[in-house]
Amino acid sequence: MIAAKANDIFQKAISDYKVLNRVEQPFINPIDHNKDPLGHLFYRKCWIDTVQWAYEDIIRDPNIDPKKALDLKRKIDASNQDRTDTVEYIDGYFLKQFESIQPRKEATINSESPAWALDRLSILALKIYHMELETLREDASENHKLACQKKLNVLLEQRVDLSQAIDELISDISSGNKFMKVYKQMKMYNDEELNPILRKLKS
């Protein structure tokens, strides 16, 4: 099933990143694009999310140097664009997979595409990883650890539910009960023609 494959790869990407646990470490995708294009994209997607999680932690330091904060903000913007592009590549994979499927006359559309649901699953993997760490902290109080364990239990349940929903969506699309339609995000703030500030700098 697609969700199980994604969950396994997301956990591997997080574990691989945490070996060095540095935002500046080089990205090396261990999954061959030619042999497993979807797995390759899943790994890249979660790596982007894992680095961005670290960026978001760092930038919240109240004593951060303003120049460093500005540099981080630009890195976060670039990461967000990379994340969006990767999600759209994943949807492109599914569109190709389902292009020969003729939807039934009564087929309906889902509120989000498979890739954007998988995006949520990747973020959820990070929440689970970090919440579990909180339950194991030796310097934390028992009340803190118990509260985090309750949150972790909810996150784990959410992963089961979301995984099932993703697999059902993909099954429905492949059987023609739902049809897939993708809208590009069309982000405007990074585009020199659409962001008025960047447009001024260009001219």
Image (cartoon, helix red, strand yellow):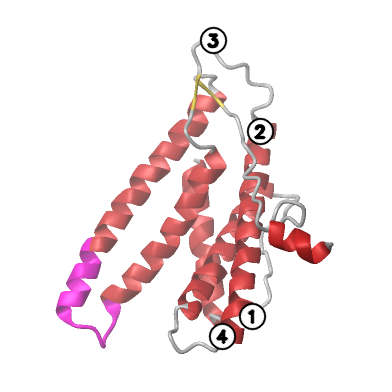
Q: First in sequence: mark 1 or mark 2? A: 1
SS for callout 3: loop
Q: First in sequence: mark 1 or mark 4? A: 1
For badge 1, the amino acid type reads Glu
The residue to which callout 1 is attached is: 24
Q: Examine the rendering and report whether any part of residue 23 can be seen.
A: no
Mark 2 Cα-neighbour bin, 10 Å: few <14, some 14–19, many ≥20: some
For badge 4, the amino acid type reads Pro
Which mark, by number, is residue 95?
Answer: 2
SS for callout 4: helix
Which of label 4 and label 2 is nearer to you?
4
Query: What residue occupies the far right of the structure in this picture?
Result: 203
The residue to which callout 3 is attached is: 105
Question: Along the line of sight, which residue is nearer the eye, 126 or 73?
Answer: 73
Does the residue at mark 1 contact the one at mark 3 (Cβ under 8 Å)?
no
Q: Is residue 58 left or right of residue 31?
A: left
Quote the CA–CA distance across marks 1 and 3. Answer: 51 Å
Q: What stretch is highlighted in magenta?
A: 136-150
Which mark, by number, is residue 66?
Answer: 4
SS for callout 1: loop
Which of label 4 and label 3 is nearer to you?
4
Q: First in sequence: mark 4 or mark 3? A: 4
Q: Position of residue 77 (x, y in %)?
A: 62, 65
Quote the CA–CA distance across marks 4 and 2. Answer: 43 Å
Q: First in sequence: mark 4 or mark 2? A: 4
